Amino acid sequence: MSKPSTNTFCNKFEFEICGKIYKRHSGLANHKITIKDANVMKPTAYDLPEKAIEEICTESQFFGVFKGYIHNYYPKTGNYKCIFKGINFYSTLSKVLGDDNWGVKYFLQHQKTFVLSYQQPSNPNDPDPLLELNLCQEPDPLQKQNQVKIYKAKKCRICKLKPIQIIIGWKRKEKSDVRNIVYSSGFIFINFTISRMRDIENLY
């Protein structure tokens, strides 16, 4: 497995897999150490043959699939978390999962739902339709001042888009009965953003 690469730009240091940016190289170095420690095999996990990894998701199976991409390990709960972010994370996960179509679901009428990997930022200079409609009238000075404040607030919200990323993790859940018999199970969770489109190229 290839090691995660980093980019240096404008005196900033970025870790490509999770998109974290540091002002100093020491910050990036500490982040790499944290990731390296998180990807060390824990006493509660053990290596499995590849065939076993393809079955249900135990802790060992999760580690076997995502080893090298784990960003956080929480010793108190035994949970793991991976963060994938940026324009290349879809192809990265395709390699990890061994499936180029892992984030796509096809429907009838040439429609498909897919996991978003990158979204172009909105243009803060685009006019606000509500403001344009109100400017056609002659508001009083106080109303006009309030409109400008609302417009500036909307511009700020547009500029601060929530980054598109996918978080994959493994959690351990334990329960006990009245006789203190403990039941433990693990499960995988995935958080992502999706979009839907229609492929019009095949309609004609």
Image (cartoon, rainbow, N blue to C red):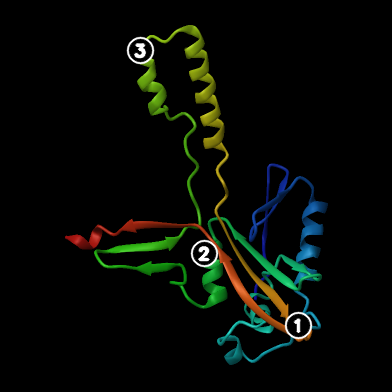
Q: CA distance from mark 1 to mark 3?
A: 71 Å
Left or right for 33, reference 85: right
**Which of the 4 image quarters holds residue 197?**
bottom left
Residue 79 in the image, given as x and y percentages of width and height: 72, 71
Nearer to me, 43 or 95: 43
Q: Nearer the viewer, mark 3 or mark 2?
A: 3
Left or right for 20, reference 90: right
Sequence-wise, which precedes: disc 2 or disc 1?
A: 2
Left or right for 96, reference 100: right
Identity of the residue drawn at 38% across and 28% down: 129
Sequence-wise, which precedes: disc 3 or disc 2?
A: 2
Q: Residues within 10 Å of mark 1 (few under 14, many from 20)?
A: few
Q: Residues within 10 Å of mark 2 (few under 14, many from 20)?
A: many
Q: Mark 2 is on which residue type?
A: Tyr
- On residue 90, the disc is 2
Q: Secondary structure at mark 3?
A: loop
- On residue 137, the disc is 3
